[in-house]
Amino acid sequence: MRVVIAEDNVLLAGGLELLLAAKGCDVVAVVGDGEAFLHAVAEHRPDIAIVDVRLPPSFRDEGIHAALRARREHGALPILVLSQYVEREYAGELLSDGRGGIGYLLKDRIGRVAEFVDALRRVAAGGTAMDPEVVAQLLARRAGDPLDTLTARERESLALMAQGHDNATIAERMRISDNAVHKHIGNIFAKLGLAPDDSGHRRVRAVLAYLDGHK
């Protein structure tokens, strides 16, 4: 798996490069700003890019805009975005195009190496990987929202779906049968008015897009 990293923190960028190399990934470029990132993507055509939300010169949203531009110009390039804090508008902006290959993780998640590498591989394969904290904030909606009609178990299922887990993993984590998971997911789609025949990461994106007002 060929990776481009856009991260201005030299220590973090170096750590990511070493970690990914140890896991068999080929880090083809490490850059520190949005323009350099776009050039690196055009030159190397990586399988996935890891991008910090905040990059020079203003350290506001250069990273997210570079990521969105790269996806427009390079066929929905898989992007794993890293952020210091949960920034809901950026998560929603990434998800709003309705395509796969999107991840949004807090930087603290990198320390959990197995989880981080698993998320990276899911995104590279066209899936979705959302940080549990991001999901929790997306689920925290105002009173009267259709989410209020979900049961506690349905909300738990939805949160795990949003993180990118498949039905078998959801069943294992919730300690219920596959049939029970299938029923919960069917109820979720019915209550939220989403197509019940959608599947895989497309289903997750549809749910997240709905939760953040981008459906």
Image (spheres, rainbow, N blue to C red):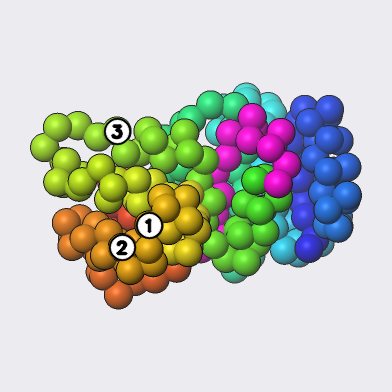
Circle 2 residues within 10 Å: few <14, some 14–19, many ≥20: some
Estimate the x, y position of residue 148 in percent, counting from the top left: 16, 41
Q: CA distance from mark 2 to mark 1?
A: 6 Å
Estimate the x, y position of residue 208 in percent, counting from the top left: 36, 51
User: With respect to residue 178, does 65 lie above or below?
Assistant: above
Task: Name the residue type under label 3.
Answer: Ala
Q: Indicate which disc residue 46 carries.
A: none
Q: Secondary structure at mark 2?
A: helix
Residue 206 in view (yes/no):
no
Q: Are marks 3 and 1 in contact (CB under 8 Å)?
A: no
Q: Secondary structure at mark 3?
A: loop
| Number of the front mark, 3 or 1 | 1
Which residue was labeled with disc 3?
140
Q: Residue furthest bottom?
A: 197
Q: Earlier in the sequence, mark 3 or mark 2?
A: 3
The mark tally for this picture is 3
Estimate the x, y position of residue 76 in percent, counting from the top left: 57, 64
Which residue was labeled with disc 1?
176
Residue at left 19%, top 32%? 142
Task: Name the residue type under label 2.
Answer: Ala
Of residues 75 and 209, which is closer to you in this image? Answer: 209
Residue at left 54%, top 51%? 129
Residue 113 in view (yes/no):
yes
Q: CA distance from mark 3 to mark 1?
A: 25 Å
Residue at left 54%, top 62%? 127
Q: CA distance from mark 3 to mark 2?
A: 24 Å
Find out whether residue 96 is within the magenta segment. yes
Which residue was labeled with disc 2?
180
Find out whether residue 14 is within the magenta segment. no
Q: Secondary structure at mark 1?
A: loop
- From the viewer's perspective, is 25 left or right of 74? right
Magenta residues, start to end: 94-114
